[in-house]
């Protein structure tokens, strides 16, 4: 059997996020986050689930690091809960919050695992939301202050920093579609939030450079490659709009210091001034980054529809596989996306900071979790990534989403993305699924069988 080999320095990892795994939502001085508030309001989340306890990682992190070591991870991507560090979002620092992340990072280093920290994976301090949250430009300033604290406290231990995770989801799902905290459905608010998030990213990149940390800073964008349903001119146009909305609205300001023009004029036709932007903002946003993080799960197929505000409608292809999230399994989209990024946006290293799938996993009679479909999903996506590398893409690493089953936002605990099964009902027992064993093998060989 022949082997597919990855480059020698390729890094294999797994990712999580604070609110999704930590629990301990009100312990050791942590402040309330917008997700604490949102989940505690009945009706927002499936089964009214919340992250109060989640995977109890706050208390079990040592055990979790051991499992990462058993799998053989080169690197682990986690996020820092801003309200653990600054309960009010600014001002007084909570030392116990800092200590938690320092202890975690030290355990990782002892285990030979490279820490990669995300500064914002959605848990904004509620006190800042009370003052307008990300719609308020001041929040970008406070984010930068929080970033500076983290660089100072952990900069000598953490070599890889991600400013934001998925600003598209934060702005649109939380402020346009209302499915995530803070739960608004206001298009202009969403555009302002998107802009201020990007602004805060640029500010935090500058602070990183000034801190002199010997490491890398970047941003993680959720990107899905868009395909037109047919080759018609209308469907091509629909593709362009969808791509501008999902992908280019974030890629273009970060890499090209501009917003996509066609979509911007569409917004300008609708609103006099779609959102506030100051002179110089785009220069701040487009400061050089050391790497791009991308989260890839599926593709989008669209058709033209004049009755839609942005002229496109998503369609669901027949006869193909879908995950439990109802997301199409489409590994070719990962290759296409990586090639496009390499061609149009950046030669800097790219990390897949999330890729994975939700399936309805069960503990089998032998006490194991045989997640065959996830194993297949991952194998196919590894191969797709390798194809992009062969075609010249500077892909430097691959983080699986997720290290463990966790709180999947609006879906609560109904969706399992982990390569480690969490038995929530049974003392939070952790079981390595077959997919974790696959990763173990892939890491050991730095490759997989063809
Ligand atoms: O669970 C999320 C994660 O927080 C952000 N990216 C997508 C994942 C799956 O929906």
Image (cartoon, rainbow, N blue to C red):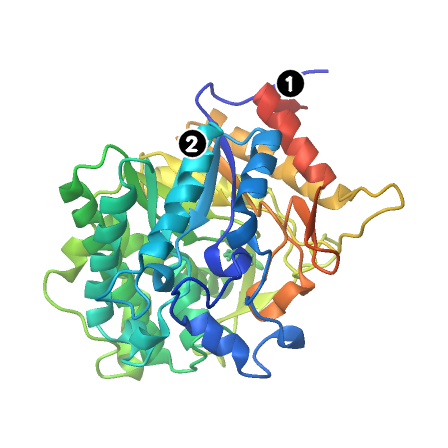
Query: Who's the residue at 53% across and 79% down the image?
Result: 40
Residue 291 pos. (x, y %): 33, 39
In front of the other: 298 or 146: 146
Q: Quadrant of residue 408?
A: bottom right
| Element carrying mark 2 | helix
The local crowd at label 1, few if under 14, some if 14 to 19, many if 20 or more residues have their Cα within 10 Å, is: few
Residue 241 visible at all? no
Residue projecting furthest to the left: 279
Please tell me how crowded label 2 is: few (under 14), some (14-19), or many (20+) other residues with Cα within 10 Å.
some
Q: Residue at x 54, y 32 (%)?
A: 73
Find numbered disc 1 in the image and state the secondary structure of the residue it sits on: strand
The correct choice, above or below, for 347 with respect to 254 in the image is above
The residues bearing labels 1 and 2 have C-alpha atoms spaced at a distance of 30 Å
Residue 161 appears anywhere in the view: yes
Looking at the image, which is closer to me, 139 or 334? Answer: 139
Q: Which mark is residue 109?
A: 2
The quarter of the displayed image where residue 202 is located: bottom left
Taking the spot 56% from the left edge, 79% from the top edge, the residue there is: 44
- The image shows residue 311 at horizontal and vertical percentages of 45, 73
Q: Is residue 278 left or right of residue 260?
A: left
Q: Which residue is mark 1?
A: 3
Split into 4 quadrants, where in the image is the N terminus? top right
- How far across and how far down the image is residue 102, in percent? 37, 44
**Is 268 rendered above or below residue 343?**
below
Q: Looking at the image, is mark 1 or mark 2 earlier in the sequence? A: 1
Q: Is residue 426 left or right of residue 282?
A: right
Numbered badge on residue 241: none
Horizontal arrangement in the rendering, residue 196 relative to residue 447 (left or right): left
Height in image: 304 above or below 379?
A: below
Q: In x, y percent, where is residue 16? A: 51, 50
User: Dots 1 and 2: beta carbons under 8 Å?
Assistant: no
Given residues 426 and 418, the one toward you in this image is: 426
């Amino acid at each position: 059997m022949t082997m597919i080999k990855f480059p020698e320095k390729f890094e294999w990892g797994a990712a999580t996020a604070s609110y999704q795994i930590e629990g301990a939502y009100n312990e050791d001085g942590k402040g309330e986050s917008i997700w604490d508030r949102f989940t505690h309001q009945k009706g927002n989340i499936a089964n009214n689930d919340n992250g109060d306890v989640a995977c109890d990682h706050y208390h079990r992190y040592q055990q979790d690091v051991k499992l990462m070591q058993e799998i053989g991870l080169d690197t682990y991507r986690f996020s820092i809960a801003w309200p653990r560090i600054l309960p009010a979002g600014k001002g007084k620092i909570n030392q116990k919050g800092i200590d938690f992340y320092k202890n975690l990072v030290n355990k990782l280093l002892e285990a030979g695992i490279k820490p990669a920290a995300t500064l914002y994976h959605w848990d904004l301090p509620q006190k800042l939301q009370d003052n307008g949250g990300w719609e308020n430009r001041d929040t970008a300033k406070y984010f930068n202050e929080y970033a500076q604290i983290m660089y100072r406290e952990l900069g000598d231990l953490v070599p890889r920093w991600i400013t934001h995770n998925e600003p598209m989801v934060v702005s649109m799902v939380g402020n346009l579609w209302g499915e995530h905290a803070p739960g608004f459905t206001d298009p202009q608010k969403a555009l302002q939030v998107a802009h201020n998030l990007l602004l805060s990213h640029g500010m935090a990149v500058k602070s990183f450079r000034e801190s002199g940390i010997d490491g890398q800073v970047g941003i993680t964008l959720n990107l899905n490659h868009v395909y037109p349903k047919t080759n018609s001119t209308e469907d091509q146009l629909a593709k362009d709009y969808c791509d501008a909305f999902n992908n280019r609205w974030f890629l273009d300001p970060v890499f090209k210091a501009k917003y996509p023009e066609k979509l911007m004029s569409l917004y300008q036709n609708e609103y006099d001034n779609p959102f506030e932007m100051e002179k110089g903002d785009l220069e701040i946003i487009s400061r050089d980054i050391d790497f791009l993080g991308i989260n890839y799960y599926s593709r989008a197929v669209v058709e033209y529809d004049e009755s839609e505000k942005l002229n496109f409608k998503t369609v669901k292809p027949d006869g193909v596989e879908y995950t439990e999230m109802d997301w199409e399994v489409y590994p070719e989209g990962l290759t296409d996306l990586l090639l496009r990024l390499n061609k149009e946006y950046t030669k800097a290293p790219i990390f897949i900071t999330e890729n994975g799938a939700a399936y309805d996993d069960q503990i089998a009679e032998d006490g194991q979790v045989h997640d065959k479909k996830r194993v297949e999903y991952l194998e196919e996506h590894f191969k797709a990534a390798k194809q992009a590398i062969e075609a010249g893409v500077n892909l430097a690493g691959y983080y699986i989403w997720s290290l463990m089953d966790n709180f999947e936002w609006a879906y609560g605990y109904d969706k399992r993305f982990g390569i480690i099964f969490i038995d929530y009902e049974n003392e939070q027992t952790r079981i390595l699924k077959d997919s974790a064993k696959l990763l173990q093998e892939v890491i050991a060989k730095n490759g997989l069988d063809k």
